[in-house]
Structure formats: structure tokens, C-alpha cells
């Protein structure tokens, strides 16, 4: 049997971590070879869907909830939990929809407030602080076509009194912010660009990115807003219609292993979903850690998000349109 | 070598009918000139023989083979364009070598020899490496000529090949053309607007008028016996003088002067066709018709007088021995046999 | 042309115009070059600190070099295929002997009209359904399709200004179809074919969307690599890659010029 | 073989490739635009055409494309003319300068513009220093930024398309114009411009269609608040995963472009004979 | 109206020196023809006067003003190009209206009237709406001519304007040119390769040789007294015959035949310059030099004989009254006053 697996990874530092934490151990253990296609979830999903007659991925990783659609369209295979030796160690929310075809979540990115600890006149503590007029000219919002942007917006909406049924308060807040001088970007590098060169002080975004900024030499810090911290799940999914699913399952199994998750947290500050994972104090401070920490995370119902995504994006677009 | 036959060839550009049914038979090795007014369809005819223009109806044969629908490159012809059509990206020598290369005639060295020879023929040996754009008009024309003759085709089509050359060079080129023609016995169709050139070079002249063949024949025939008014007018630049033939067979002009005419004609109103070089001029007093000098045009070896004869404008062409000036009355004489009469 | 044929104020205006245009064209490149020598992790201009570390990173990282070679390979193949197919079609259209030439000319433009992503998805769906997994050939075909319009357009435009008698003259000199193409039509269309070929190369070399969707492991082009790098961890390494590309281009053109006399080609 | 067969043979490979490798795949994609849960539907179109927001996006796309095309032509024509008429050395350098930007990835180049145009970038800072702009003035995320970036990307296409044609124009025609009383500029307007029309047409066709269908540059420089149709299509494909709607937008874009181009080609083709 | 003055004008194209210091003075309203061999620099000179070509050194004045560095459109000249340079995107009428439009001459209606008149002048009234590509060569040339004359410029430059026209039309056009010239008193510089045309039209002829002015003067002067061998050769197609002048002043040919020469010359070896139209031919037995007929070339009104005289090839041009054929021995006579002698 063919001993190669094709997966997607997210490039850059993420891909490096992916390699050290998951792929290398996997290759060592199975003698198989892993080929990586560097693609964001959205692009990878589009590719998966278009290629449904001859998919090239064996395992596909998503960070924006695409597994829900993928599973519904039959592009992904249901997973038998018993075939994953590490499934038992996962928190329950990380393995909720195996039967539908959604794979396990193997990392969590926490969405909070990224800010410039030097330039920003005060350290923000709550989502409400985003509305502080002193900050608005230095505020960077992220478009909700971006997964993190979506979660950040929903959290802002919630802090303004909205719900998943009613996002109008969030939209109102956004238009107020835009009027006051905030800007909207749609990709992560633009956030870096804004922080590095254009006097941006604060942005609702993910913990791992704050870490990236710090590594790049910026004075960025991450805080969790007092109202709560939305979580973005990174899932590892089993692609349907591929010959070597056994091997693919093995790969997913390693992704959710204790060692792999510790390694990810160490390298990129992602929160583990494996309850057995143990983190050093320094790392733990940057992530949501342990049963309690994880419980504090808010997970907006991904099914609802998927159901409403089109409408929300349209409403959002109309709100921000100049 | 090959004969060329056109059978009732017609050609129209959209609504513009250009050739109205041309039939022509050109023998193998013949040198035929096409003469005709500007825009009468000479170039169009050459292009049809070359295969560059489809006929509207009719048939074209070369060497006994129906080529009406044959591609030009398969016809073994060679054509010199009125606008030269030199390839701008090739040097003079490369332009001339082009037909040899295309037809695969000879080795590279032989081709180069032929090119050199053709360049010498047109007296351009020193410009072999220039690009066409760097040549004068006459030089370009000679390159085009060299390119047309270099490949010794069965049929040679030349469209006003010498129009931009000075008299000396033109004579030289005429001699070269005749010699090439004699040596290789090429069937040659030659378009020219220069009558003397046509008369001196050709075995036969085909006179065109508005897309029809007006007359054809040897140079001497066609010159001596123009069949139509157009022909005599076009070839000899003839004067038309109104007259009345009397019962005695002599002609009376409008002012009452009389002259003898050779042809026997029933009495009546006619036009006399007087060719300008047939009329001789003498000082007043000599026998002949009286006329008044209007203008004298100096032509070097010859001289043209514009005269007033019986109230009509008459041109004559004569030598430079005697000169008359404005207002002189002169006496004109003309061999009665050379006067043609056409009814009015 | 004689010097006084062009008024001096026009000369001055032309100089200023050229300078401004060149500044405009080069401005972002200067930024890119500047950033590439930056010491810092992020893209900022003017750069803080000078270093060659990003060049080191790029040159020692095989992903860039292998992506570069993939791109070059595809771009060269596309240049050939698009120029041959597009050039041939342009010549046929130019002669106006096919029914509906004008319509066909528009037809050849259509790959430009749709955003590449639509084509990318369509091509991926189609290929997967009919041939299965994508390959190098898929990408080659895809790039050829989107490069053809450039060749057709530029060649058509140039041919429309050339002397129609030249091809006829060649025919009377015995040039067959192929010879006419080779020795008359192609030299006449050369500026257009050249521009088209260059566009084709460039389109393929710089194409990201189609390459993004049609890729598979081991088939990553340089733009996809750069795009990914910028998406996931933007650092001056992309600037270093681009600077190397700029330098390579200049050197390549000058070398070709030395060897073939490009200025002569450029003047026809 | 007849001439017609020859031309057919010349055109056939290209036509075939386009038919098989373009129209087949794209057709399959575009039928999605009438794809609904219960058979064929025009719902996606009516959603687009009935919504001021999307019509606005379409209008912006067409408007910006026109502006970009006009600016490219205004710069590209003189540029090409100068390139065609300077000496061979200078021409070589100009050609290098014009094609250099093309050899840099669009994304990277656009990032160069981002750096130059954003709030603390060189250009706004310069304008601020000269007192021409306010404290928070930025060119980023404006239509101006899109136009600047797109002109930069597309100018070489325009210039080189025109250059090919101008280099074929017989200079004696210009000279004839001068002897007939044209000033230099009149010669350009009455002789060079009409004769280089095929190049201008070719260039503007390329530029217009490219700017109407391009996504990376407008998206990076215009930001999410100034969407163009291609970006919206991109979003529908990858983010909202609404492919039928994406296909419908593509059809609308296709139709919109044709609507602009057909009269243009008609108008200019008649002068080409 | 304006005079044109060239002062030691030199021109080189790169290493190719084309004009070697031309000085010319053309009076206001004068009609000057430039004659010269192909490639001698005639077009180049016109282009310099028009301002299309920068001089390498020297000075150009028009109407007393130094225009050496003046743009062409400011010179109030009009030039007809050897290659026509018709604007392909404009119709015939628009081409002709072009200079009027550019110079802002008259209202639109007036312009159209002038265009119509110019079209009639060149006999092309019916083709006003054609595009240049749809015209025959001669028609294109006439459009170019009409365009050159339509705007009544101060200086009219014509580069072989009639080379592609048939004899009839050519005469008509010559008459028109002369009439326009007389009516408007345009200063006209006219390049032609046709000597008769130059002789008949011009006030003055300037004879060019390899980028230098060889001779200039009125047609009669320059024809009668060619100053150099080149001039006599070029203008009269003269024959050069080797001879020796004896002590009695008469010349002896190689075969011992003798003839009288007019000029007084010291004894010695010389070449006799015998113009071909000065020699008359008579049947054997008449007084004169004996020669043998090699070829007779029929030219219509005239006839050219190629003869063998004392072992040399001699051409003569004569009327068509008597005919001789190959091998006939004939007797040649020539007025001693017309024989020029140049040392050998
Ligand atoms: N661009 C050029 N480079 C080099 N030589 C040139 C260039 N243009 C013209 N010449 C040369 O200059 C000479 C004069 O050219 P010009 O066109 O003035 O001749 P011309 O007297 O008009 O001849 P023709 O009667 O054949 O038209 C020619 O020998 C020609 O080869
Ligand atoms: N494409 C065309 N459309 C319409 N009429 C045309 C076209 N081409 C040529 N003609 C006309 O056909 C006639 C014959 O043209 P052709 O070129 O054969 O004349 P020609 O005898 O060679 O004249 P010239 O001596 O002036 O060169 C001309 O009256 C010309 O106007
Ligand atoms: Mg003709
Ligand atoms: Mg000339």
C-alpha cells in the first residue's frame, strides 16, 4: 500500500510547528511520508470541494468551521473514536461530531485583545474598551470573512448586548467605530503591518498572533476580555474517498496526542484540547489551560454560524461599505 | 518557358467593375507590354496572372495548365510590385536572395553568386548590406527589379519597373531586360506608362482602356494603325481637327483652308486625326496650312509647339532646327497618307 | 528624425514625463529592495538596520529554490505553447479569411474576462471529474489558456499595421505557406509576438490563483510560495526573493542583449 | 490546401484548447449560477440585481476599471511613443524599466504600495509635511490607492501593446504631416494616434478586462470596505462557500464587461481598415 | 512667395556622405528642376528644404529667414513625397483636405471647394471617398499631388510627382502644374528623372551629380552647353568617340575616316562628344562618315539606331522617315559646331 499522506498546513511558523510536533513523530512511527500543501482552510476547502471526484488530501485541517459544511456535503468521513488511541483524553467538546464526519479539534486559538503594550495609553481589559474614543483611531478590526474576525465580531456583538439571533448591536458598534476612524483589514499580515508601521494600538484577534507579533520584535501583548474569550477550533479531518484512511487516522491520532499538543502550545501558544497536556508556567500564561481554563472559553455554536454566515457576511459588508 | 492565356477574365472589387472580360494569348518567350491610362486595370491583371487576386469569372492558363485556382507560389512566376514590397527586415542582398531561398534554387554559394550578379545588373553592388529603408527611391526600385529577375522564372511580371529611374539608367536597364529576356526566353509581361519604352522593348503591345483590351499588335502596327480614336489619341497624342470633306475628296477647315487627305471618304462633317509628330512646320510662305504659334515648349532634342489652327488648338512635335516664337505665323504640312479621318 | 522636428518644450516635457513615470514604476520596487535588506522581522520602510539575513534565509531554503524552478519550468513551457497557439491564431484572424473573424477575436479574449478564481475552480472540478488528480500538465494547460489572449491581442494589433503586399510578394517569389509564416509574417509580427511572449511568461510566472487551486505536493510555484509566506508569516524574505528576481531579470536582459543584440530586435 | 484551410489549421489548435480547456470547465462552473435547491432558478441573479449593495460593487468595478484604463492609456501612449522614437540604447533601458515591475510578484509589489500609501507611509507623510493633508490622512483603503496600484500593475501591458504598433508606423507619414502644417502635437493627434489605434484598443482591452477581473491588488489596497466584484466573487467562493452566487456574480461581471467592450470594439474596428 | 537659399549644405547619414556642400539660390516664384542620377541626393535635398532632415553643416534660408533649425510646419512649404505618404486612415478627400485643416485655411465649405477643385485638377473627382489602399498606383500619386498643391504654400517641393502616370495624363498634369505655378507664383522645386519634363517645365535646371551641383542654368543653356562630360552625357545621352586631332584641325577616327570639328583644338588624342540627336543619318553614298547598322529600335515617333562607327558603338536618335536594317551601311553627318571635344 502507498505509504504517503497528503495533508494541508497553514504555512510559516505554523507549518514548522506542525512538522516538529506531528509530522516528524508520525513519519518516525509509521515509516510513511507526509506531503504538505500549504493552504488556509478556506482555500483548502474550496480545493477539496472542487476535487470531490478525485481528492488529493488524506487529512485536511480547518480553522474556520469548514468541517461542518464539508461533513454535511459528504466530503469528510465519519471517524470511529475507537480507532483513535488518544480520543479518550480529549475534552468532550473536541470530539463532539465524529459521527457526522467532523474531525477532532486538536488546538484552540483564543480570541482576545491584542494591543501594543508601549504605545497604547492603557491596557485594555474588556471588549467594551474597544469602544473607547481614545483608541478608535488606532483600532484595527478584522473582516468577518476571516475566521478570527468572525469570532471577534460575535464577541463584540455579545458585549454590546447582541446574540447569535441578533447581530445588529454588533454592527451598530462597528459602524460607530469606523466613523471614529477605526480601520478594517482582512488578513493577518495586514494587522502586523498596521502595528509595525501605522500606529495601530489595539485589535481583537487571536492569542497565537500576539505571540507571532512579539516574536517579530513588536511590543504586542494579548489579554482575554473580561466578558469572555471566544475559541477558534482547529480540527483535523478525515477525507472521504481516499485509499489509505487507516494511515490518515493514525495521523489524526498523533495530532491529538498529549505530546503533540504540548509541543504546539510551546511553539505557537495554542491551547491544547488534550486534557493530559502539561504546560510550563510561561506557556500556560499565554493560553487557556486546563479543565477550568478551557471551560472559560466561549464557543459560539458553529452550526449556527455556518447557517447564518452568508447573511451575516452580507450584512457586515453593507455595514462597512464606504 | 510557358505561354499565358487569359480567357474572358472579369474582376470586380465589390461594386467596382475593374476588368470587363479580358482575353489574351501570350506565347512562350514573348515580351508583351501592357499600356493604358492610370487606373485602367493593368496592375489588377498582373495580380490575376500572379494568382494574388481571384478572378470574378474567367480562366487563367500558364503553360497550358489551368491555374485559375492555383496558389501564386506554385506558378513559377516572379512579380515586381509597383510599390516594390521589399521586406523591411532583410538587407538588400537578403531580399534578392529570398526567391532563391524560397524556391531552393542552388546551393548557398550559387545563390550568393546569383545575387551578386543581379546586383551588378542593377548597378547596386555597393549597397548589398543596406536595409531597404536606407535607400533612395530609385535604388529601392532597382532592388525590387533585381529580386524579380534573379530567379529566372517561367513568367516574369513587371509592374512599372523603371518609373523612378533617370533616363540613363533607364536605358541601361532596358538593355539589361532585353538581354535577360533574349538569353532566358522568359515570357515577360511588362506594365509601363512610357510609350517609347513599350514600343522599343516589346514583341507585342496590349493597349488597355478602362478594363478592356482596346487593341493589340506589334509596336509598329499598333503605332501606325491605331484602330480606334482612343488608340490613336493615347499612343500618338493626336490632334483632332474639325473639317468637312468636300465632293472633291479634300477637306475644308473651319476657316476655309483646305488640305488634301489620303483616304477616300464620302462628303460630310468629319474629324481629322493629325498626329503631332507627323506635322512638319516651316516659316510662313511655304506651302501648307497657316497657323499661329501660341507656345513653344523646349524639350531638349525636340520641341513642342502649341498652335492655333483654324481656331483650334493643335500640338506638334518637331526637331530643334528652326525656332518660332509667340505670334509667328507658320505653315504646316502633313503627308495626306498619314491623316486619319473619323466621322463626327 | 531631425532634432528640430520635436520642439524643445516637448523634449523637456518628455524627459519629465519619463522621469515621473520611471519613479512611479520603480517606487514600490524600491520599497521591496529596501525592505529586503532590513534587519527586522517585519516589513517596514525605510528599513531599520541593514543585513543580508533574509537573503541567507531565502537562498538556503529549498522551498524557494524548488518553487522557483517549478515556476520557471512552467513559465517557459507556457511561453512556448501560448506564443505558438496564440500567434498562429492571431495570424489566421489577421488574414480575415475565416468566417466571423471579429467574433473569434473576442472569443480569444474571454479567458481574461472572468476572475481567475472562477476558472480555477471550474478547471479543478472538470479535471478531477475527467482525468482525476491534477498534475504539472493541468497547470501548464491552465496557464496557457489564460496567457493566450495576450499573445493574440498584441500580435493582432501589430500585424494590422504591416504592409499587406509583403506576404503577396513572398508568394510570387515561391514562398510556400510555412516559409511565408517563417520569413515574412512572423518577422512582421515580431514586436507583437515578442510582447505577447513576454506577457505569457510573466502571466504564468506571476500567476497565483490558478496555481493555488491546481497545486499538489511538489507542485508549488513561486507566487504561491510568496503568497503563502505573506499570508502566514510575512517577513522580508519575500522582499529578498523579489529583489533577486529583479536582479536576475536585469542581468538576463543585458546578457541576452550582449549576445543577440536585443536593441536591434527592439528597434524593428 | 486552400488558404482558408491553412487559416483554419492555424486557428484550430488555439480554438480547440480554449473550447476544451476553458469553455468546458467554465461552462460547468457557470451553470451553477442557475442552480437552486429545486432545479433551475434565477434567484442568485435577482439577489444580486435586486440589491443596491451589489449593484454598487458592480458599478465601482466598472467605474474603477474605466478610470484605470483611461489613465493607463494616457500614460501608456506617450510612453510607448517615446520608447519607439528614442535611440535603441535608451529604448532598451526603457523597456527594462517597464517590464521590471512585471518580474516582481504582484502581491509583493502591492505590499510595496501598502507601505508607501498607509498612514505612516512615505507619501501621506510627505503630503502631511507639506500641509496638504490631515493628521490621520492615509491613502490606503481609498479608491485612489486601488487606481494607483492597478495602474502600476497594468501600465506595462498598455505600453507594450502600443509600442508594437507604433514601431510599425511609417515615420514618413509623420513627416508628411509636418510638411502639411501639423505641429508636433497635431501630428501625434491626427496621424500617430489614429494609426496606433489597434495597439490602444488591444491595450485597453487587456487593461480593462484585467482590472475588472483582478482581485489581489484592489483587495489589498482598497481593503474590505471598498469591495470590487472579483473580491466579492472570491469571498463567495472561499469564505461563504456560496458557489452558485459566485457563478452568478461572474456571469454578471462577464456580461458587464461585454456590455462595455462590444460597443468599444465596434467603434474602433471600423476605423481599422 | 519666398526665395530659397542653401549655403554649403552638407549631409551625412552616419558614415555615408550624401550631400557634399550644396549652395543654391532659388528666386521667389522660380520653377527649378533637380535632375540627377538615382541615389545622387535629390530627395535628401528636398527633405532638408522641407525641414525633415537636419543638415550636417550649412544653412537654409526661406524668404530671407534662416530656417535651418525651424520645424517643417512653420516653413509654409508643401512637399509631395516620392513614396506618396498618403494617410491610410483617411479617405482621398480627407487626405487632400488635411493640409487645409492643419493650417486652418478657410471655412469648412471653402476647404471642401478647394479639395473638389484639386481633385478635378488631377482628374480624380469620382474617387473622393475611397481609401488610399483602394487606388491604383497612378491614382495614389495624383492624390499625393493634389494634396501638395491644394494649400498654395510659398514653396512647393515635388519629388518625382508624375513618375507613375501615362504620357497623356502626364502632359495634362504638366500643364496644370505650369498653370498653377504661373497663377500663384509659387516657388517650386521639382525633382524628376525625366529630362524632357525638366527641360520643358523649368525656369532653371540644377544638375546633380553624387551630392554636388554639377551645373545649373536655363533649360536651353544647360542643354546646349553642358559644362562637363557628366552633364553632356547625362542630358544628351552623348556618344564618346575616340579620335585624334590633326594639325589641320580636323579629327581622324580610329579607322582613318576624317571629319571636321568646329572647335579649335591643339593636335592630340581626344574624345569627340556626339549627341545622339545631333547626328543625322542618310543612305550610303551621301557625304559623311560611314557606319554599319547594328540595331534599330522603334520608338514610335522616333527611332534609335545603334551603329558601329570605326569599331565603336554609337547611338543616334532620328525621325522615322527612312528605315535601315541590320547590316546596312549608312552615312552619318553632324554639324561641326555641335561637336564637343574633350581631351583623352
Ligand atoms: N538612412 C540612410 N542611411 C544611409 N544612406 C542613405 C540613407 N538614406 C538615403 N541614403 C543614401 O543617400 C543617397 C541619396 O538618397 P536620396 O534619396 O536623396 O536619392 P535621390 O537622389 O532621391 O535618388 P532617387 O532618384 O533614386 O530617388 C542614396 O545613395 C541613398 O542610398
Ligand atoms: N480595393 C479596391 N477597391 C475598389 N477599387 C479598386 C481597388 N483596387 C483597385 N481598384 C480600382 O481598380 C482600378 C484598376 O486598378 P489598377 O491598380 O489595376 O490600375 P493600374 O492600371 O495599375 O493603374 P496605374 O497605372 O495607376 O497603376 C482603379 O480604378 C482602382 O481605383
Ligand atoms: Mg498599377
Ligand atoms: Mg528620391
Image: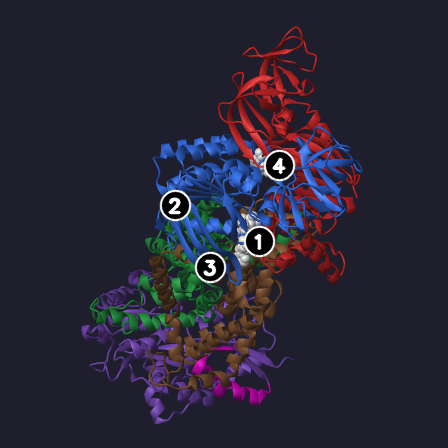
Chain colours: A purple, B red, C brown, D green, E blue
> Same subunit under labels 4 and 2?
no
Q: Are marks 4 and 2 in contact (CB under 8 Å)?
A: no
Image spot of residue B79 (x, y percent): 67, 45
Q: SS for tag 4?
A: loop
- Read off the residue under disc 3: D84
Q: Quadrant of residue B178?
A: top right
Q: Is mark 4 within 8 Å of ligand 2?
A: yes
> Same subunit under labels 2 and 1?
no
> Same subunit under labels 3 and 4?
no
Taking the view exactly as shown, the residue that stands out farthest to the front is E248
Disc 2: host chain: D
- Read off the residue under disc 2: D181
Magenta span: helix, strand or loop, mainly? helix
Where does the magenta region start and end?
Answer: A7-31
- Near mark 4 (Cα within 10 A), the count class, few <14, some 14-19 or many ≥20, is many
- Read off the residue under disc 1: C90
Amino acid at each position: 500500500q502507498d505509504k504517503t499522506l497528503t495533508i494541508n498546513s497553514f504555512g510559516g511558523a505554523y507549518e514548522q510547528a506542525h512538522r516538529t510536533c506531528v509530522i516528524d513523530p508520525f513519519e518516525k512511527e509509521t515509516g510513511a511520508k507526509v506531503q504538505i500543501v500549504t493552504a488556509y482552510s478556506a482555500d483548502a476547502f474550496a480545493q477539496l470541494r472542487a476535487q470531490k471526484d478525485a481528492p488529493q488530501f488524506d487529512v485536511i485541517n480547518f480553522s474556520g468551521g469548514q468541517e461542518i459544511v464539508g461533513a454535511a456535503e459528504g466530503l469528510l468521513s465519519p471517524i470511529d473514536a475507537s480507532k483513535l488511541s488518544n480520543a479518550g483524553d480529549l475534552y468532550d467538546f473536541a470530539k463532539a461530531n465524529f459521527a457526522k464526519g467532523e474531525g477532532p479539534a486538536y488546538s484552540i486559538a483564543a480570541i482576545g485583545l491584542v494591543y501594543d503594550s508601549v504605545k497604547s495609553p492603557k491596557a485594555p481589559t474588556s471588549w467594551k474598551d474597544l469602544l473607547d474614543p481614545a483608541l478608535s483611531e488606532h483600532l484595527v478590526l478584522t473582516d468577518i470573512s476571516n475566521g478570527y474576525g468572525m469570532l471577534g465580531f460575535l464577541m463584540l456583538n455579545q458585549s454590546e448586548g447582541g446574540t447569535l439571533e441578533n447581530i445588529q448591536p454588533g454592527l451598530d458598534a462597528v459602524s460607530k467605530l469606523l466613523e471614529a476612524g477605526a480601520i478594517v483589514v482582512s488578513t493577518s499580515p495586514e494587522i502586523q503591518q498596521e502595528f509595525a508601521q501605522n500606529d495601530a494600538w489595539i485589535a481583537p484577534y487571536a492569542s497565537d498572533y500576539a505571540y507571532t507579533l512579539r516574536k517579530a520584535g513588536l511590543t504586542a501583548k494579548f489579554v482575554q476580555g473580561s466578558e469572555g474569550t471566544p475559541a477558534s477550533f482547529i480540527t483535523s479531518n478525515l477525507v472521504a474517498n481516499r485509499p489509505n484512511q487507516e494511515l490518515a487516522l493514525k495521523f489524526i491520532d498523533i495530532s491529538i496526542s498529549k505530546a503533540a499538543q504540548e509541543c504546539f502550545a510551546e511553539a505557537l501558544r495554542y491551547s491544547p484540547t488534550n486534557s493530559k497536556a502539561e504546560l510550563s508556567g510561561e506557556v500556560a500564561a499565554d493560553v487557556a489551560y486546563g479543565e477550568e481554563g478551557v471551560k472559560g472559553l466561549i464557543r459560539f455554536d458553529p452550526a449556527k454560524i455556518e447557517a447564518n454566515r452568508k447573511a451575516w457576511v452580507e450584512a457586515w459588508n453593507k455595514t462597512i461599505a464606504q | 518557358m510557358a505561354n499565358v492565356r487569359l480567357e474572358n477574365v472579369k474582376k470586380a472589387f465589390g461594386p467596382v467593375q475593374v476588368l470587363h472580360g479580358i482575353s489574351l494569348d501570350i506565347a512562350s518567350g514573348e515580351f508583351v507590354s501592357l499600356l493604358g491610362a492610370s487606373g485602367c486595370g493593368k496592375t489588377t491583371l498582373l495580380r490575376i496572372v500572379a494568382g494574388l487576386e481571384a478572378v470574378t469569372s474567367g480562366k487563367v492558363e500558364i503553360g497550358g495548365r489551368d491555374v485559375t485556382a492555383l496558389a501564386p507560389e506554385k506558378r513559377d512566376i516572379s512579380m515586381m510590385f509597383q510599390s516594390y514590397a521589399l521586406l523591411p527586415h532583410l538587407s538588400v542582398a537578403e531580399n534578392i536572395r529570398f526567391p532563391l531561398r524560397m524556391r531552393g534554387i542552388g546551393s548557398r554559394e550559387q545563390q550568393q553568386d546569383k545575387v551578386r550578379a543581379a546586383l551588378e545588373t542593377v548597378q547596386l553592388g555597393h549597397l548589398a548590406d543596406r536595409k531597404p529603408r536606407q535607400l533612395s527611391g530609385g535604388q529601392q526600385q532597382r532592388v525590387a527589379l533585381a529580386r524579380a529577375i534573379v530567379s529566372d522564372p517561367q513568367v516574369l511580371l513587371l509592374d512599372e519597373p523603371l518609373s523612378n529611374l533617370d533616363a540613363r539608367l533607364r536605358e541601361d536597364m532596358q538593355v539589361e531586360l532585353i538581354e535577360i529576356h533574349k538569353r532566358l526566353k522568359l515570357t515577360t509581361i511588362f506594365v509601363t506608362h512610357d510609350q517609347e519604352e513599350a514600343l522599343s522593348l516589346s514583341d507585342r503591345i496590349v493597349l488597355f482602356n478602362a478594363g478592356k483590351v482596346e487593341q493589340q499588335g506589334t509596336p509598329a502596327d499598333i503605332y501606325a494603325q491605331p484602330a480606334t480614336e482612343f488608340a490613336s489619341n493615347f499612343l500618338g497624342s493626336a490632334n483632332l481637327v474639325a473639317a468637312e470633306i468636300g465632293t472633291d475628296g479634300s477637306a475644308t477647315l473651319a476657316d476655309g483652308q483646305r488640305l488634301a487627305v489620303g483616304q477616300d471618304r464620302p462628303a460630310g462633317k468629319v474629324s481629322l486625326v493629325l498626329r503631332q509628330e507627323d506635322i512638319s512646320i516651316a516659316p510662313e510662305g511655304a506651302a501648307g496650312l497657316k497657323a499661329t504659334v501660341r507656345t513653344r515648349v523646349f524639350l531638349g532634342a525636340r520641341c513642342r509647339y502649341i498652335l492655333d489652327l483654324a481656331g483650334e488648338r493643335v500640338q506638334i512635335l518637331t526637331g530643334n532646327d528652326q525656332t518660332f516664337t509667340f505670334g509667328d505665323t507658320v505653315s504646316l504640312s502633313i503627308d495626306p497618307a498619314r491623316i486619319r479621318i473619323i466621322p463626327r | 528624425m531631425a532634432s528640430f522636428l520635436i520642439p524643445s518644450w516637448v523634449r523637456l516635457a518628455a524627459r519629465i514625463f519619463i522621469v515621473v513615470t520611471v519613479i512611479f514604476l520603480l517606487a514600490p520596487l524600491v520599497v521591496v529592495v529596501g525592505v529586503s535588506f532590513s534587519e527586522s522581522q517585519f516589513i517596514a520602510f525605510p528599513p531599520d538596520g541593514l543585513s543580508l539575513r533574509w537573503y541567507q534565509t531565502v537562498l538556503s531554503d529549498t522551498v524557494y529554490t524548488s518553487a522557483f524552478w517549478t515556476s520557471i519550468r512552467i513559465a517557459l513551457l507556457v511561453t512556448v505553447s501560448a506564443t505558438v497557439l496564440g500567434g498562429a491564431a492571431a495570424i489566421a484572424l489577421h488574414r480575415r479569411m475565416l468566417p466571423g473573424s471579429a467574433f473569434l477575436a473576442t472569443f480569444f479574449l474571454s479567458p481574461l474576462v472572468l476572475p481567475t478564481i472562477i476558472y480555477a475552480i471550474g478547471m479543478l472540478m472538470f479535471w478531477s471529474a475527467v482525468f482525476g488528480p491534477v498534475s504539472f500538465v493541468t497547470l501548464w494547460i491552465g496557464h496557457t489558456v489564460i496567457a493566450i489572449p495576450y499573445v493574440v491581442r498584441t500580435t493582432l494589433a501589430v500585424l494590422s499595421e504591416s504592409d499587406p503586399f509583403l506576404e503577396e510578394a513572398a508568394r510570387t517569389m515561391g514562398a510556400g505557406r510555412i516559409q511565408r509564416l517563417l520569413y515574412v509574417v512572423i518577422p512582421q509580427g515580431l514586436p507583437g509576438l515578442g510582447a505577447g511572449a513576454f506577457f505569457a511568461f510573466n502571466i504564468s510566472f506571476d500567476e497565483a490563483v490558478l496555481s493555488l487551486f491546481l497545486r499538489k505536493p511538489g507542485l508549488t510555484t513561486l507566487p504561491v510560495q510568496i503568497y503563502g509566506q505573506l499570508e502566514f508569516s510575512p517577513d522580508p524574505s519575500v522582499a529578498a526573493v523579489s529583489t533577486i528576481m529583479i536582479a536576475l531579470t536585469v542581468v538576463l536582459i543585458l546578457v541576452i542583449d550582449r549576445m543577440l543584440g536585443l536593441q536591434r530586435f527592439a528597434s524593428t | 490546401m486552400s488558404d482558408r484551410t491553412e487559416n483554419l489549421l492555424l486557428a484550430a489548435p488555439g480554438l480547440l484548447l480554449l473550447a476544451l480547456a476553458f469553455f468546458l470547465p467554465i461552462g460547468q462552473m457557470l451553470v451553477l449560477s442557475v442552480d437552486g435547491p429545486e432545479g433551475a432558478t434565477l434567484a442568485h441573479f435577482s439577489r444580486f440585481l435586486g440589491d443596491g449593495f451589489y449593484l454598487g460593487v458592480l458599478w465601482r468595478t466598472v467605474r474603477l476599471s474605466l478610470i484605470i484604463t483611461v489613465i493607463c492609456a494616457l500614460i501608456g501612449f506617450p510612453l510607448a511613443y517615446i520608447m519607439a522614437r528614442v535611440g535603441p540604447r535608451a529604448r532598451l533601458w526603457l523597456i527594462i524599466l517597464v517590464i521590471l515591475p512585471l518580474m516582481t510578484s504582484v502581491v509583493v509589489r502591492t505590499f510595496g504600495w501598502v507601505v508607501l500609501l498607509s498612514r505612516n507611509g512615505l507619501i501621506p507623510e510627505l503630503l502631511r509635511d507639506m500641509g496638504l493633508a490631515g493628521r490621520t490622512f492615509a491613502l490606503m483603503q481609498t479608491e485612489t490607492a486601488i487606481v494607483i496600484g492597478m495602474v502600476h500593475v497594468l501600465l506595462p501591458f498598455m505600453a507594450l501593446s502600443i509600442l508594437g504598433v507604433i514601431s510599425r508606423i511609417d515615420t514618413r507619414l509623420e513627416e508628411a504631416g509636418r510638411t502639411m502644417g501639423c505641429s508636433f502635437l497635431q501630428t501625434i493627434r491626427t496621424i500617430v494616434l489614429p494609426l496606433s489605434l489597434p495597439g490602444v484598443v488591444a491595450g485597453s482591452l487587456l487593461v480593462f478586462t484585467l482590472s475588472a477581473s483582478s482581485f489581489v491588488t484592489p483587495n489589498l489596497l482598497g481593503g474590505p470596505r471598498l469591495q470590487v466584484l472579483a473580491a466579492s466573487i472570491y469571498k463567495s467562493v472561499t469564505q461563504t462557500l456560496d458557489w452558485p452566487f459566485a457563478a452568478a456574480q461572474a456571469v454578471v461581471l462577464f456580461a458587464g464587461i461585454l456590455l462595455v467592450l462590444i460597443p468599444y470594439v465596434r467603434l474602433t474596428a471600423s476605423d481599422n481598415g
